[in-house]
């Protein structure tokens, strides 16, 4: 079975690609999970994050944005001592602040999903494989807005990857069995 060229032989990577990556997500819980993981991925490989995903789920209270938003210094220290996750104090502190802003966006737009999908009039954008970019005008725009709201680790490259992961961008390569 042909897959996108970035997928390795790792079964976890193949499962992620086949059943999750590029599938439209509208559920705020799942959107937050992927958002948190993408922000921790900045500067690292995605497979590293996938292998630590269950540890992140446990450490970050099942990706409960309302719990993460109220983490205190004791919880930050607990996370910094958790060898199963990425122990970067800036990313951990950003995760807390980003969760607070995520909730503010939910209040403003009714859901984080409404916020994100409003950028495309709730339509999926199909990209062709010759468009192998790492940023786009859309990721630039969303990144700029999130930064203006006070979020961190939300550069255009991270947001572009996030948009692919949650299916706003469908970017399966032509040879991939999931290409539309």
Image: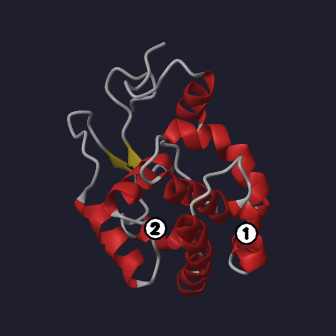
Q: Residue at x 32, y 75 (%)?
A: 144
Pick the front one: 66 or 44:
44
Q: Quick check: 172 above or below 61?
A: above
| Quadrant in the rendering for residue 148 | bottom left
Image position, residue 133 (x, y; %): 24, 45
Q: Quick check: 121 above or below 19?
A: below
- The single residue placed furthest to the left in the displayed view is 130
Residue linked to disc 1: 77
Image position, residue 42 (x, y; %): 44, 54
Residue linked to disc 2: 116
- The single residue placed furthest to the top in the displayed view is 1
Horizontal side of 27 relative to 165 (left or right) equals right
Image position, residue 174 (x, y; %): 31, 25
The secondary element bearing badge 2 is classed as: helix
Horizontal side of 68 relative to 7 (left or right) equals right
Q: How many marks?
A: 2
Q: Nearer the viewer, mark 1 or mark 2?
A: 1
Q: Residue at x 40, y 59 (%)?
A: 159
Q: Quick check: 14 above or below 65?
A: above
Few, some or many residues within 10 Å of mark 2 (<14, 14–19, 20+) = some
């Amino acid at each position: 079975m042909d897959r996108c060229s970035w997928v390795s032989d790792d079964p976890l990577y193949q499962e992620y690609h086949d059943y999750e990556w590029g599938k439209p997500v509208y559920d705020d819980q799942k959107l937050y999970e992927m958002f948190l993981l993408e922000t921790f991925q900045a500067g690292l490989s995605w497979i590293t994050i996938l292998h630590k995903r269950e540890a992140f789920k446990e450490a970050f209270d099942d990706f409960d944005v309302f719990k993460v938003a109220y983490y205190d210094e004791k919880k930050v220290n607990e996370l910094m001592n958790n060898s199963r996750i990425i122990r970067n104090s800036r990313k951990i502190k950003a995760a807390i602040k980003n969760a607070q802003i995520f909730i503010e966006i939910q209040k403003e737009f009714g859901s984080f999903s409404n916020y994100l999908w409003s950028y495309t009039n709730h339509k999926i954008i199909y990209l062709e494989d010759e468009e192998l970019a790492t940023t786009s005008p859309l990721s630039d725009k969303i990144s700029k807005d999130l930064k203006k709201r006070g979020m961190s680790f939300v550069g255009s490259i991270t947001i572009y990857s996030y948009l692919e992961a949650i299916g706003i961008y469908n970017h399966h390569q032509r040879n991939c069995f999931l290409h539309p």
